[in-house]
Image: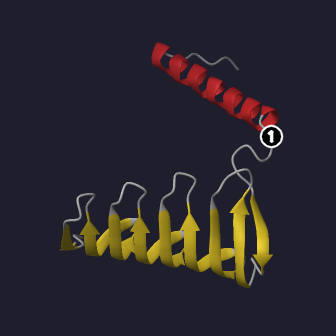
Amino acid sequence: MIFHFKSSELHFLNFFRLLILSLTLLTLLLPANALGQYVCEKGDCVNGIGKKIVSNTQAYMEGKFVDGVLQEGKVLFPNGDVFQGKFENNKLLVGEKIFKDGRRLEGEFFDEVLVKGKITYMDGTSRFIQLKRIN
């Protein structure tokens, strides 16, 4: 069986081959902890209160874990940002995001977006917001 491809299809196939090759090389060449590996530093990081750190960084998450996933607590990111509150599916649900530059988001979040709460800007001014969901 012989396949004939159009020029645009050949570009796509070549791009796809390059993508697969790149991902394969990254998997083989990068050390396992190059992207960050969580290590339980103290407590029960599976079903209890504990603290997980990210290898070779200052980043960590601490609080209440269920099945190894943070449900309530605090996450410090490598860039200095802090998210704290209640989490669902590894996303902040209710709480606050405190950014290193001074901005702050407090309230209810949906898919990482503040939908009801308060925004405080770097200059200290703030405002309340409530987004409506459009179906």
Is residue 123 or residue 84 the one in the foreground? 123
Determine whether, in the image, residue 39 is placed left or right of residue 22. right
Q: In the rendered view, would you say 46 is above or below 102?
A: below
- Location of residue 120 in the rendering, given as x and y in whole percent from the top left corner: 26, 67
The number of callouts visible is 1
Q: Residue at x 23, y 58 (%)?
A: 123
Q: In the rendered view, would you say 116 is above or below 15?
A: below
- Location of residue 98 in the rendering, given as x and y in whole percent from the top left corner: 41, 65
Q: In the rendered view, would you say 91 is above or below 49?
A: above
Tell me the residue that label 1 is attached to.
Answer: 31
Q: Residue 133 occupies which quadrant of the picture?
A: bottom left
The quadrant of the image that shows the C terminus is bottom left
Secondary structure under tag 1 reads loop
Estimate how packed mark 1 is, as few (under 14), some (14 to 19) or many (20 or more) residues with alpha carbons within 10 Å. few
Residue 89 in view, yes or no: no
- Location of residue 110 in the rendering, given as x and y in whole percent from the top left corner: 38, 71
Residue most extreme to the front = 123
Residue 56 in view, yes or no: yes
Determine whether, in the image, residue 63 is placed left or right of residue 106. right
- Location of residue 95 in the rendering, given as x and y in whole percent from the top left corner: 42, 78
Identified by mark 1, the residue type is Pro
Q: Residue at x 57, y 23 (%)?
A: 15
Is residue 6 or residue 37 the one in the foreground? 37
The quadrant of the image that shows the N terminus is top right
